Image (tube, helix red, strand yellow):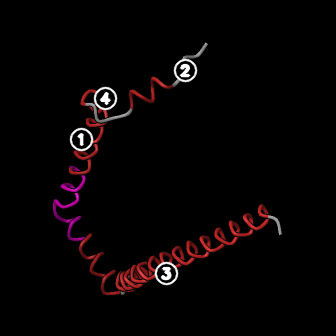
Amino acid sequence: MSDRTRELAERRATLRLRCAVQRRAIAGEVESIEARLATVDRFTGAVRSFASHPAVVVAGVAAAIVLARTRGFRVLGNALVLLTGIRRLLRLLAPVLGGGSAGVRASSIPPRP
């Protein structure tokens, strides 16, 4: 076997070994992520089960009725309007305050001929 052929065979073996090590590392990471996601899946299943329980649904409807009879919905509506207004104001002031990229987007659009 020539020197070049032997060198290429050694390089190929080294690369295969490196790939195997990387595959094992990736498999370990995937197993770790799957374990964390299994916990999240169990939690969301418990929340779904709890939220679909008839007593919880009845309590939610009762709370909505109580809020409708009081000023609760009016207060929630006013808070939503206030929040929307603040968001719009911040969006308008973002270029002035230096926190937004609206000016960058507008300047990156070429003018029409």
Q: CA distance from mark 1 to mark 2?
A: 31 Å
Question: Is residue 19 shown above or below 45?
Answer: above
Residue 35, given in percent of the width and then of the height, sits at: 44, 83
Residue visible at 31% across and 82% down in the picture? 58
Residue visible at 22% across and 45% down in the picture? 82
Q: Specify which label sits upstream in the sequence, 3 or 1.
A: 3
On the image, numbered disc 3 is attached to which residue? 31
Q: Specify which label sits upstream in the sequence, 4 or 1.
A: 1
- Circle 4: element type: helix
User: Which stretch is magenta?
Assistant: 65-78
Q: Nearer the viewer, residue 109 or 12?
A: 12
On the image, numbered disc 2 is attached to which residue? 110
Q: Is residue 15 left or right of residue 94?
A: right
Please state, as top left, top right, bottom left or bottom right, where the C terminus lies in the image: top right
Name, please, the residue furthest toward the right. Answer: 1
| Tag 2: amino acid | Pro
| Tag 3: amino acid | Glu
